[in-house]
Amino acid sequence: MEKVRTRFAPSPTGFMHVGNLRSALYAFLYARQNNGDFILRIEDTDLERYVEGAVDVIYSTLKQAGITFDEGPNEGGAYGPYVQSERKDLYLKYAKELIVKGGAYYCFCDKDRLDSLVDATGIKRYDKHCLSLSKEEIQTRLDRGDKYVIRQNMPTTGVSEYDDMVFGHIAIPNEELEDQVLIKSDGMPTYNFANVVDDHLMAITHVIRGNEYLSSTPKYNLLYQSFGWELPHYMHLTPIMKDETRKLSKRHGDANFDDFINKGYLPEAIVNYIALLGWSPKGTQEKFTMAELIEHFDVKGLSKSSSIFDENKMRWLNGEYIKELSFDRFMTYATPYFEKSKIKGIYDYQKFGKLLQSRIEIFSEIPEKVDFIVDFKQIDDELYFNKKLKIDASIARIVLEKSLPYFENLQIWNEEKLHEVILKTASDLEMKSGVIYTVLRIALTAVVVTPGGSVEMADILGKEESVRRIRQSLLWLKNE
């Protein structure tokens, strides 16, 4: 049985789009599941779109995602080099070999002639004009230094067929296949040609990519057949959609991995969610570790329909991951966001962290969840109103007047002692403790909803600031 070899072959054009990351993930999962090899190859033949530093971004993203390689530009391997621009001479050699075999030909047509090849519907299609050039004329033009491209010689009759692991049997009439360019006028190969040559030379057994290549795969297969090479297996993946009609698009700035990391998503949550876009596992399990994804991934679960990217669902899943973090690891992720908030250098991050771990879905929520404690401002009497607990401004004033001396005289300021003060106040006033907690929360923070209750807020603020705020809130209630 052949050893499974899959590859991820991104172009270094910027940040990692979630669609590319999913292709890498599925190729990785399939290789690992079958005890095969997973290869990284950089496809940098499109020099105009090349972005400096993009290869580092690819490596950084995949490392954070937990995706590892057996071979690649940094890892080395028996099938290198693993960067297409470093293999340039190789492609021209194979293109010329294909010319000899009749599978390709030189084309000297200039831009004006190519622009004139428009049919009644406005579609440009090459007409095989240069296929009929004699060997002598071709050699004369080559010797003269005329610019040329090398085109694939497509059959014009019959049908090209293959079986896809997701979509089943695919058949494309050969008359629909245009004589595509294999080598450009600058000597660089096109994506279509370099892909086939590299996949063969690197012994790739399974090609996993987007289904936009379903209809062009026959062109690739004709190249394999012209060379007498064995065809790989194909697994074409449906697109990830922004909504019912629009694809997620890297070129339009949609959803790249780094954006989500910067928003405060955990890498493992992103990977987990992306794995489920287009793949339905058996059963009801939604949270998967990488080891579980490797174990459960199944081509039979791949969808033939597009998936819609639902960030709310990914937020929820991320929140589940956050809840399961150890507190130390949670604080490692959370601290940079506390540092960006208004409480920087003022209040205890750990005390807030204990309140927030179960209350946030992404880490970037932290500043908005804690800034309130710094933004203490005059409290409108109406804020105290609570119909259920029968609280109004007059009740709030009674509560604060009664509790203030207890807080002022409290020697040990911790949650246990603060609870005792509140219960003592409730007892003295013959009120429900919920009334005291509610009034104090507002008096201490000037807001109705906080990540913790009044005791937690007083503990974070400390005695001096808590007493100052209760005094001030009481003055506001007295209109002083």
Image (cartoon, rainbow, N blue to C red):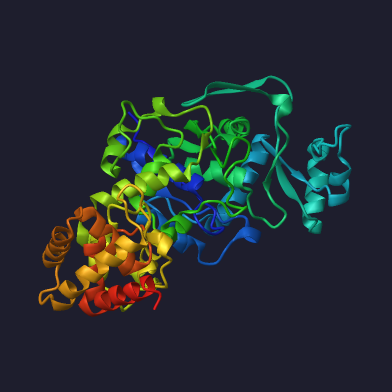
Image position, residue 192 (x, y; %): 61, 43
Above or below, 397 against 467 in this view is above
Image position, residue 248 (x, y; %): 57, 45
Above or below, 62 against 420 in this view is above
Q: Residue at x 40, y 27 (%)?
A: 301
Image position, residue 140 (x, y; %): 82, 51
Whether residue 69 is visible here, answered yes or no, is: no
Quadrant where the N terminus sits is: top left
Front position in the image: 473 or 297 = 473
Image position, residue 52 (x, y; %): 55, 67
Above or below, 247 against 218 in this view is below
Whether residue 221 is visible here, answered yes or no, is: yes
| Quadrant of residue 30 within the rendered picture | top left
Left or right: where does residue 113 sit relative to residue 199? right
Tally the numbered discs. 0
Q: Residue at x 60, y 47 (%)?
A: 191
| Quadrant of residue 472 within the rendered picture | bottom left
Front position in the image: 344 or 371 = 371
Left or right: where does residue 184 sit relative to residue 51? right
Left or right: where does residue 210 sit relative to residue 279? right
Left or right: where does residue 4 sit relative to residue 234? left
Quadrant where the C terminus sits is: bottom left
Front position in the image: 374 or 342 = 374
